[in-house]
């Protein structure tokens, strides 16, 4: 389990203990992204391993640190989830079950039993980029911006050793993975409201930045040439 | 080009190059990074002394005034310099992130399950779910 957390003291403890209760055999790694509110301490107390970043790595930077850890410690599967309590740990087993058939499984908020309300503008954006990504990948995906994912070793190795977006890894990353010949799948997950803290994309500025960055990111991802070898051999 | 402009250009270019050299001397600017600025100062100096290339270029690009050519080339030059600097910043950001991640991974984890034995068992349980490819 890789859980990136930046100033999520209000929720990280309960997320970690719920995951630990449901899946006692799993190693839970919290990447404390230079938090100032004791997030790392609370995660530690709840039973997680904690890696503390000395500077703000950004969401993508923290996630990639988790991938690097998993790569170096020889894990075969990584489940990525948020520390804010939005992702229901019940969904983990569905993700893992689906990872038998796919190299990367996305937990979708819009598929099946999602109980989640988002502002209409964000919804339009999420749907739009999902549709674009689906068209490019030739696979129907409903929620490409979800940070609730299960990644097999070849996929997280690719993302650990190669480039990974610092700010919002999103549809572009899925396209990148898919262009390396990996199978990307989707399962429905339950999504809650945030327990505490603030969203990564909040405010007009970051929304505009997001809306401008995504099409560009998708475009350059299409233009890039996938590494000749995939998975562990990518350097 | 009148004499006044040429004299001012000469003075400015000399002062500019002197300032760049002073920055390098006081280690605020690296030698390699200073080259582009010294060349720019030298270019201004040459154009102030030897006007012919500027007039030729003005005719070539169809401008009416040599001043326009000067402003235009200055703008193009500065645009490329700032683009180049931005790529340097991107590269440095990547390097800093890489280093920060390395520090994060090396600083060691806190929390239970640190022992090799536990990690080994847990790794095995992952392997069962998904065979290594």
Image (cartoon, coloured by chain):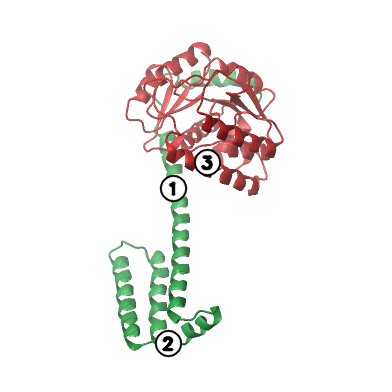
Q: Nearer the viewer, mark 3 or mark 1?
A: 3
Q: Nearer the viewer, residue A203 or A148?
A: A203
Labels 1 and 2 in the same subunit:
yes
CA–CA distance in space, label 3 to label 1: 22 Å
N-terminal-most mark, 1 or 2: 2
Please report, as a chain letter, where disc 2 is located: B
Q: Are marks 2 and 3 in contact (CB under 8 Å)?
A: no
> A109 left or right of B111?
right
The structure residue drawn at horizontal position 37% and vertical position 25%, both measured from the top left corner, is: A39
Where does label 1 land, which residue? B93
CA–CA distance in space, label 2 to label 3: 51 Å
Q: Position of residue B128 (x, y in %)?
A: 63, 18
Q: Which chain is red?
A: A
Label 3: state its secondary structure: helix
- Mark number, residue A81: none
Image quarter of residue A92: top right
Labels 3 and 1 in the same subunit:
no
Categorize mark 1 by other alpha carbons within 10 Å: few (<14), some (14-19), many (20+): few
The structure residue drawn at horizontal position 32% and vertical position 78%, both measured from the top left corner, is: B14
Vertical arrangement, residue B126 with respect to residue A211, above or below: above
Q: Nearer the viewer, residue A116 or A62?
A: A116
The C terminus of chain B - image quarter = top right
Image quarter of residue B70: bottom left
Vertical arrangement, residue A188 with respect to residue B16, above or below: above
Where does label 3 land, which residue? A211
Labels 2 and 3 in the same subunit:
no
Q: Nearer the viewer, mark 2 or mark 3?
A: 3
The structure residue drawn at horizontal position 72% and vertical position 36%, both measured from the top left corner, is: A138
The N terminus of chain B - image quarter = bottom left
Q: Colour of chain B?
A: green
Categorize mark 2 by other alpha carbons within 10 Å: few (<14), some (14-19), many (20+): few
Label 1: state its secondary structure: helix
């Amino acid at each position: 389990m890789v859980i990136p957390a930046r100033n999520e003291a209000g929720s990280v403890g309960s997320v970690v203990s719920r995951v630990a209760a449901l899946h006692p055999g799993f190693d839970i790694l919290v990447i404390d992204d230079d938090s100032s509110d004791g997030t790392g301490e609370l995660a530690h107390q709840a039973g997680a391993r904690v890696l503390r970043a000395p500077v703000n790595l950004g969401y993508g930077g923290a996630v990639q640190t988790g991938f690097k850890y998993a790569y170096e410690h020889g894990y075969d599967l990584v489940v990525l989830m948020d520390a804010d309590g939005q992702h229901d740990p019940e969904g983990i087993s569905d993700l893992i079950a689906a990872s038998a058939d796919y190299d990367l499984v996305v937990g979708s908020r819009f598929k099946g039993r999602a109980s989640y309300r988002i502002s209409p503008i964000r919804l339009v954006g999420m749907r739009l980029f999902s549709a674009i990504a689906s068209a490019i990948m030739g696979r129907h995906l409903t929620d490409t911006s979800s940070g609730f994912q299960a990644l097999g070793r070849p996929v997280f190795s690719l993302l650990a050793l190669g480039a990974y977006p610092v700010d919002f890894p999103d549809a572009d990353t899925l396209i990148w993975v898919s262009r390396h010949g990996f199978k990307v799948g989707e399962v429905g997950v339950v999504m809650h409201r945030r327990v505490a803290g603030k969203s990564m994309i909040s405010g007009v500025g970051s929304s505009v930045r997001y809306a401008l960055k995504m099409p560009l990111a998708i475009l350059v991802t299409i233009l890039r040439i996938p590494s000749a070898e995939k998975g562990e051999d990518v350097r | 080009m009148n004499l006044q402009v040429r004299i001012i250009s000469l003075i400015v270019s000399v002062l500019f190059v002197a300032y760049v050299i002073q920055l390098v001397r006081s280690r605020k600017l690296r030698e390699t990074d200073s080259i582009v600025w010294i060349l720019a100062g030298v270019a201004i100096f040459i154009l102030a002394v030897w006007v012919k290339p500027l007039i030729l270029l003005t005719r070539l690009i169809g401008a009416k005034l040599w001043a326009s050519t000067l402003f235009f080339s200055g703008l193009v030059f500065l645009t490329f310099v700032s683009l180049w600097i931005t790529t340097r910043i991107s590269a440095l950001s990547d390097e800093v992130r890489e280093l920060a991640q390395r520090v994060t991974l090396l600083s060691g984890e806190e929390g239970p399950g640190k022992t090799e034995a536990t990690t080994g068992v847990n790794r095995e349980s992952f392997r069962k779910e998904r065979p290594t490819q």
